Image (tube, helix red, strand yellow):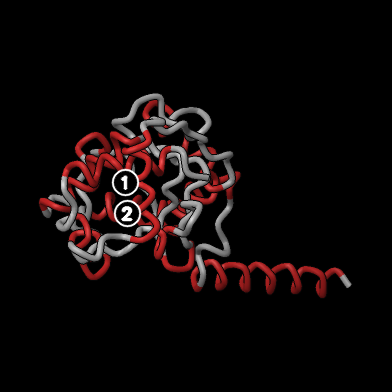
């Protein structure tokens, strides 16, 4: 009986390891992620909500997106000077664990600037895009409530700092950030004016 139980334990362990290798997201462990994420709090906040617009909120972010960013930064595909060396020793599974930890946190709820013209422009661009400039609707990928799509690695935008949204769009537009699949965000951001970026950034701050 003991041999049978031992055999079952070994078999289950082997199956678990195989599953982790085949599907690291399914095997992601938020508890393990919490320990690894301790260093993140200085910039992204104890609750995953950054105290400054220079750094993004991570609370409630899609697991797939956060994991991809961690691995891209680690591998040099995305350059973030402020994160130099922070995730160099992360394995892929570490990235998924940390991402799951932040995904389980309560996302930020922001309050947009109530300026009617600014809100109207942001709403129009986010929901419908712009036919004249060929700008697609943000909602097509990020959803009407800004929650993103985990299976497609599209991030949540709801409640994100406007400063961070604007700087990210500017980086994509200038080609200074290039870890977007098929250059999708570089193409989109290049079609946006500064005022477009400001309007969308303000709108998503209060979107939920």
Q: At 41% across and 48% down in the image, what residue appears?
A: 157
Residue 42 placement: quadrant: top left
Q: Residue furthest left?
A: 174
In-image side of 78 versus 106 (left or right): left
Q: Label 2, label 1: how many angstroms apart (C-alpha)? A: 6 Å
Q: Residues within 10 Å of mark 1 (few under 14, many from 20)?
A: some
In-image side of 48 versus 163 (left or right): right
Q: Which residue carries the number 2 mark?
A: 125
Along the line of sight, which residue is nearer the eye, 191 or 33?
191
Vertical arrangement, residue 132 with respect to residue 86, above or below: below
Tell me the SS state at disc 2. helix
Vertical arrangement, residue 138 with respect to residue 80, above or below: below
Along the line of sight, which residue is nearer the eye, 12 or 164?
164
Tell me the SS state at disc 1. helix
Q: At 27% across and 38% down in the image, what residue appears?
A: 83
| Residue 39 in sight from this viewpoint | no
Q: Position of residue 190 (x, y in %)?
A: 15, 56
Q: Position of residue 117 (x, y in %)?
A: 32, 38
In-image side of 125 versus 35 (left or right): left
Vertical arrangement, residue 62 with respect to residue 168, above or below: below
Along the line of sight, which residue is nearer the eye, 24 or 69?
69
Q: Position of residue 181 (x, y in %)?
A: 27, 67
Q: At 23% across and 70% down in the image, what residue appears?
A: 182
Q: Are marks 2 and 1 in contact (CB under 8 Å)?
A: yes
Q: Which residue carries the number 1 mark?
A: 121
Q: Residues within 10 Å of mark 2 (few under 14, many from 20)?
A: many
Along the line of sight, which residue is nearer the eye, 45 or 96?
45
Q: Quadrant of the N terminus?
A: bottom right
Q: Position of residue 4 (x, y in %)?
A: 82, 75
Q: Residue furthest right?
A: 1
């Amino acid at each position: 009986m003991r041999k049978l139980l031992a055999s079952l334990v070994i078999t289950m362990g082997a199956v678990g390891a195989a599953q982790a290798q085949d599907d690291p997201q399914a095997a992601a462990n938020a508890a393990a992620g919490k320990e690894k994420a301790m260093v993140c709090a200085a910039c992204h906040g104890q609750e995953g909500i950054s105290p400054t617009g220079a750094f993004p909120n991570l609370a409630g972010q899609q697991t797939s997106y956060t994991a991809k960013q961690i691995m891209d930064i680690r591998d040099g595909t995305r350059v973030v000077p402020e994160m130099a060396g922070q995730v160099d020793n992360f394995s892929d599974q570490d990235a998924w664990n940390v991402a799951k930890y932040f995904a389980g946190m309560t996302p930020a709820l922001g309050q947009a600037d109530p300026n009617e013209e600014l809100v109207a422009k942001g709403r129009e661009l986010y929901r419908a895009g712009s036919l004249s400039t060929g700008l697609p609707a943000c909602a097509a990928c990020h959803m009407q409530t800004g929650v993103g799509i985990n299976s497609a690695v599209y991030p949540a935008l709801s409640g994100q700092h406007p400063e961070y949204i604007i700087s990210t769009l500017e980086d994509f537009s200038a080609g200074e950030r290039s870890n977007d699949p098929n250059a999708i965000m570089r193409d989109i951001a290049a079609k946006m004016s500064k005022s477009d970026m400001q309007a969308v950034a303000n709108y998503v701050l209060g979107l939920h």
